[in-house]
Amino acid sequence: MILASIGSIAYWSRLLKSETPTIHLNHSFQKQSELSQYEILTSQGRLKLSIPTQKKTRRGPYENVLIDYSSDWQTEHWRSISNSYQKSPFFLYYGYKLEDIYLTEYKTLVQFNHAVLNALCNCLKLGDPPKMNHTSETYFVKTPTLNNAVYPQVFDTTLKFEKNLSVLDLIFNLGPEAKDYLVSL
């Protein structure tokens, strides 16, 4: 598997079902993929958040892609996440674990994504995160899709159910049940 930014529900379901989950880093960076994007649910519907990267580093290996800090994307992302999920049942219990990541400047996209992976594994009580693999094999990003079973979402009284958002939606809305949900898909 690839090291996604936050990862969709389908991504995390596949990761949990893998017998020996391994994250492969030896592939090319692909714009507009889960490597640097994820979606959350706001009161207006789906919102795609993208981590800006330095253009000159995008053509090389994924592990060499540098984050672009010319804009205050971290504050924007965290504000969007916080505004969207602060009224969810489990934001209080998990939000602070992710907020620290958004307050830290990571040099590369892989470093940021790895920090997020560790925090999400902690939230889902998965134990050790998957191993990182630097083999000479090349892997391409393929975003999996699923038909998610409906679960309560923050804005479900005003918006229809949105499937396959980032795993943040699931964690903040289901809390400790999120892992069981992912395994059941």
Image (cartoon, grey):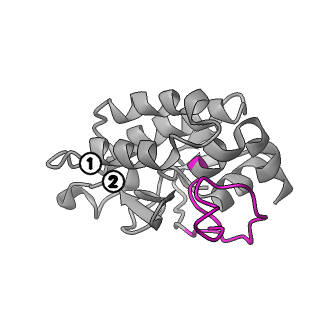
- Asked if residue 51 is among those painted magenta in the image, a careful observer would answer no
Question: Which residue is drawn at the image coordinates 29% and 48% (left, top)?
Answer: 76
**Rendering quarter of residue 99:** top left
Identified by mark 1, the residue type is Trp
Residue 171's tag is: none
Q: Position of residue 59 (x, y in %)?
A: 28, 64
Image: magenta residue range = 142-168
Residue 73's tag is: 1
User: Which quarter of the rendered picture does the C terminus lie within?
Assistant: bottom right
According to the image, label 2 marks what residue? 51
Question: Which residue is drawn at the image coordinates 70% and 38% (left, top)?
Answer: 175
Judging depth in this view, the residue of 35 and 145 nearest the camera is 145
Is residue 119 visible in this depiction of the protein? Answer: yes
Q: Position of residue 150 (x, y in %)?
A: 76, 63
* Label 2 – label 1 distance at C-alpha: 7 Å
The correct choice, above or below, for 63 with respect to 101 in the image is: below
For marks 2 and 1, give the one nearer the viewer.
Answer: 1
Q: Are marks 2 and 1 in contact (CB under 8 Å)?
A: yes
Is residue 18 visible in this depiction of the protein? Answer: no
Identified by mark 2, the residue type is Ile
